[in-house]
């Protein structure tokens, strides 16, 4: 398959939104790319890593988002074009630098920097659906947001151009329904120019003299706002005298367009399509609001644009305009936008009826379909070492008998909290937060807090942000057990490299950081265990829970998907001895261990194996109390 | 020509079954045939045993959004039996065509005996009642017979092409398969595709 840099100018290819953003970066002559994996943003850096070229395009998986933007920001101050990509949660991590970076600007006439932040409305693959558009206003940083995959490509070029001309960082917002949509995209010309690099030692880029710099920044933002008022990416589509104006942005545009069509209103509605979100082009919006007395604002998650439309109306002294949207109760306050809620809103505003289903079909859904549907919660893959680790943790905590409290964080280990996991983790928020939370709880003994405290983190998270928290724990004499589930991959987001894998974003050899050595150097006592050695792991955890200080247990075993890709063979061929199996009486393997490859066979009344799902790890054989699961050397391949 | 326009195909299944490849093959072919195509996908955490689906939106008029309006699917390919019900309950209508792999993949709620997986007859009855045309076959069994459970998606692609809902010519699909899978797997995938076509032949 061709890589995106090889597509010819003018040719049209089927691209994922994130690939379109990556191509847009190449057409902008991007030289320096950084980021940390996070759905739905990960494919941007991953795609660019495939085309990285020494001396022309540097691509890295950074340790975390803060390191990513600091590196990219510095590269821009030296005259390069840099891009960072991350999910919404990552932008929060990066913000400390970015708020100050807005005050200093890039300080270089040639440099340019774009930070792509991808939101996940509905939290399809996230713990929250936080709307990062507010952070543009918070960080005094202009923000752009495309409506379609084609525009996703074109807009990156404008973002770099804007950044270079104004010497400011630009936020570019993606969202799940753009990042993970594929549609035909026509290529422009890739730019191979590289600026002469130079760090100007005659100026100092620092935010001090905040008032002076904030004043200059405000003036610059006002200049950018004036540019946005006439920006061709903002457009109006529809009749000169529409019955209703829909102000839409992001995923809202295609949904609103379709909703209008579903009600047969497409020729009566005017669409104000907003691409420059901040600073808000108030005059442009007001000009079009005048066309109709009724306005519906369609966006997703928060009412960011709606608030700004209302602000614009007030500022412009306009009256007699009725605003519909989240505020009026016509559109949902939470979740992603879809055609249906917009269609219902339009139906209510215009009085034209709209029903998604006939009453007859609604009856079929309720009586015939819904009673059979079972929720399919997330779980670890068959063969995942985390299932074994949490099994051992559960056993050890029960045997310890002091109601140990387990904190966790983001990544595949998170899957524990779902009913399909082992439900050990009881406190979980953000990357690395399990360690920080446990460090706090581990200092509560003087307050008569007597439960042992256990933090669980993954290996990529360890590097991302657990380390400073571990330092805090040791420094402040906390008593806790830190379990690091080291599966040698950033597995949840697609197995990206991290400092512990010995590889970089390009797949080349890189210095390998040793987790155990790092922990030892901090003053932690370190133990290493193999999660597949269940009995030994249980014993180890029980022993460590009795010790003082900050104990670290590294449970090391490769992610099954990564292992399988490399080794292409299962360790064992699993068989069930139906004579020995106690079936429903026991069912530990299916109902408690919950490996997706084992089920209770209603025909035999015994455990059954789904061979096509089984990874042959053999852990089920070790936990079966009746030795009814047998592991044989796999000879199939 | 496609009818209706836009034509909404939903490909559902479980993470890891290859529904994204399937939908992209269809999407690329329809795009090459001169249609606007937009595919909305769910992946990420959903890979871990969760329900996944792709919506392939095909039109001669313009690009449609990645989300199909409720009740507006025109065809459903489900790589897993229960998932067909889930998709129908949101996107179904009396005219929709459904091509369903009858092999279950049990949700963990079933493994842990908090829920019971419906019987195959119940699933067939419900899908048939909630669709205009329904086709059932065990694509997983066919893939296992080929020694490669991974090609279940290509067997199902054969089912879609065999049903003839979209103007997809088998020879062009085979060309697209060849460019989408590693060379060593070409024959295996082509065999799987042809098995799928014959599975729905009457």
Image (cartoon, coloured by chain):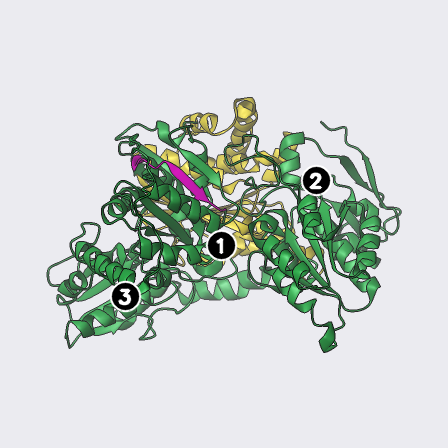
Residues at marks 3 and 1 touching, judged by CB atoms closer than 8 Å: no
Colour seen for chain A: green
> Is residue A217 visible in this depiction of the protein?
yes
Colour seen for chain B: yellow
Membership of B195 in magenta stretch: no
- Asked if badge 3 and badge 1 are on a common chain, one would say no
Residue pointed to by mark 3: A297
Q: Residue at x 14, y 74 (%)?
A: A318
Residue placed furthest toward the left = A240
The image shows residue A292, relative to residue A494, as above or below, that is below
Residue pointed to by mark 1: B87
Distance from disc 3 to disc 2, alpha carbons, whole Å, reads 50 Å
> Is residue B55 visible in this depiction of the protein?
no
Q: Quadrant of the C terminus of chain A?
A: top right
What residue span does the magenta drawing correspond to? A27-36
Residue B37: image location, x then y, percent = 34, 42
Label 3 neighbour load within 10 Å: few <14, some 14-19, many 20+? many
Q: Is residue A339 left or right of residue A503?
A: left
Residues at marks 1 and 2 touching, judged by CB atoms closer than 8 Å: no
- Asked if badge 1 and badge 2 are on a common chain, one would say no
Q: Which residue is drawn at 29% across and 58% down?
A: A249
Secondary structure at numbered mark 1: helix
Secondary structure at numbered mark 3: strand
Q: Which residue is drawn at 31% across and 60% down?
A: A140
Residue pointed to by mark 2: A615
Label 1 neighbour load within 10 Å: few <14, some 14-19, many 20+? many
Residue B71: image location, x then y, percent = 40, 58
């Amino acid at each position: 398959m061709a890589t995106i840099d090889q597509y010819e100018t003018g040719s049209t290819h089927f691209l994922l939104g994130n690939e379109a953003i990556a191509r847009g970066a190449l057409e902008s002559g991007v030289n320096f790319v950084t980021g940390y994996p996070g759905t739905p943003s990960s494919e941007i850096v991953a795609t660019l890593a495939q085309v990285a070229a020494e001396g022309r395009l540097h691509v890295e998986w950074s340790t975390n988002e803060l390191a990513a933007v600091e590196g990219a920001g510095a590269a821009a101050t030296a005259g390069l074009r840099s891009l960072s990509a991350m999910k919404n949660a990552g932008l929060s991590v990066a913000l400390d630098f970015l708020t100050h970076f807005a005050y200093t600007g890039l300080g270089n006439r040639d440099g340019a920097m774009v930070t792509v932040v991808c939101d996940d409305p509905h939290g399809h693959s996230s713990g929250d659906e936080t709307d990062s558009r507010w952070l543009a206003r918070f960080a005094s940083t202009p923000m752009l947001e495309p409506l379609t995959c084609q525009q996703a490509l074109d807009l990156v070029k404008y973002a770099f151009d804007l950044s270079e001309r104004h010497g400011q960082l630009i936020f570019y917002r993606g969202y799940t329904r753009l990042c993970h949509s594929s549609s035909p995209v026509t290529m422009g010309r890739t730019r191979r120019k590289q600026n002469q690099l130079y760090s100007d030692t005659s100026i100092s880029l620092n935010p001090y003299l905040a008032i002076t710099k904030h004043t200059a920044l405000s003036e610059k933002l006002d200049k950018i706002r004036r540019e946005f008022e006439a920006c061709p990416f903002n457009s109006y589509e529809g009749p000169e005298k529409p019955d209703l104006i829909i102000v839409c942005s992001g995923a809202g545009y295609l949904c609103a367009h379709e909703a209008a069509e579903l009600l047969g209103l497409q020729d009566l509605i005017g669409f104000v399509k907003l691409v420059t979100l901040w600073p808000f082009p108030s005059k442009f919006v007001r000009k079009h609001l005048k066309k109709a007395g009724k306005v519906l604002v369609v966006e997703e998650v928060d009412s960011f644009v709606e608030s700004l439309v209302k602000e614009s109306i007030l500022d412009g002294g306009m009256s007699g305009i009725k605003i519909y949207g989240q505020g009026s109760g016509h559109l949902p306050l939470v979740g992603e936008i879809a055609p249906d809620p917009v269609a219902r809103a339009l139906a209510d505003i215009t009085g034209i009826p709209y029903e998604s289903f006939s009453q007859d079909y609604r009856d079929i859904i309720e009586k015939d379909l819904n009673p059979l549907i079972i929720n399919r919660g997330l779980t670890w893959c068959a063969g995942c070492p985390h299932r074994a680790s949490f099994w051992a943790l559960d056993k050890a905590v029960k045997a310890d008998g002091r109601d140990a409290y387990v904190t966790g964080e983001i990544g595949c280990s998170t899957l524990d909290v779902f009913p399909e996991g082992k439900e050990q983790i009881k406190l979980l928020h953000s990357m690395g937060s399990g360690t920080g939370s446990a460090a706090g709880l581990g200092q509560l003994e003087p307050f008569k807090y007597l439960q042992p405290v256990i933090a669980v983190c993954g290996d990529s998270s360890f590097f991302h942000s657990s380390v400073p928290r571990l330092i805090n724990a040791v420094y402040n004499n906390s008593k806790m057990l830190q379990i690091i589930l080291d599966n040698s991959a950033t597995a949840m987001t697609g197995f990206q490299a991290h400092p512990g894998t010995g590889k970089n974003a390009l797949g080349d050899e890189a210095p390998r950081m040793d987790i155990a050595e790092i922990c030892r150097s901090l003053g932690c006592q370190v133990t290493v265990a193999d999660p597949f050695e269940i009995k030994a792991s249980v014993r180890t955890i029980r022993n460590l829970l009795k010790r003082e200080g900050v104990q670290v247990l590294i449970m090391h075993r490769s992610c099954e998907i990564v292992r399988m890709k490399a080794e292409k063979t299962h360790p064992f061929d699993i068989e069930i001895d139906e004579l020995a199996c106690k079936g429903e009486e026991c069912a530990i393997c299916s109902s408690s261990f919950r490996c997706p490859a084992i089920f209770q066979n209603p025909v035999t009344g015994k455990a059954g194996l789904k061979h096509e799902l089984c990874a042959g790890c053999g852990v089920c054989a070790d936990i079966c109390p009746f030795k009814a699961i047998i592991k044989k050397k796999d000879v199939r391949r | 020509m496609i009818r209706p326009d836009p034509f909404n195909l939903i490909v559902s299944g479980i993470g890891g079954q290859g529904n994204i490849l399937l939908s992209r093959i269809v999407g690329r072919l329809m795009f090459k045939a001169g249609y606007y195509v937009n595919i909305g996908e769910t992946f990420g955490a959903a890979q871990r045993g969760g329900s996944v689906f792709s919506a392939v939106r095909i039109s001669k008029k313009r690009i449609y959004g990645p989300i199909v309006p409720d009740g507006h699917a025109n065809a459903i390919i489900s790589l897993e039996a229960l998932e067909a019900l889930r998709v129908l309950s949101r996107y179904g209508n009396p005219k929709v065509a459904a091509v369903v792999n009858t092999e279950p993949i049990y949700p963990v709620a079933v493994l842990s005996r908090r829920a019971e997986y419906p019987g195959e007859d119940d699933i067939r009855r419900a899908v048939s009642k909630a669709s205009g045309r329904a086709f059932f076959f065990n694509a997983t069994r066919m893939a296992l017979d080929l020694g490669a459970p991974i090609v279940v998606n290509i067997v199902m692609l054969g089912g879609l092409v065999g049903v003839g809902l979209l103007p997809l010519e088998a020879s062009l699909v085979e060309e697209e398969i060849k460019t989408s899978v590693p060379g060593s797997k070409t024959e295996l995938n082509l065999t799987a595709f042809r098995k799928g076509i014959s599975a729905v032949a009457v």
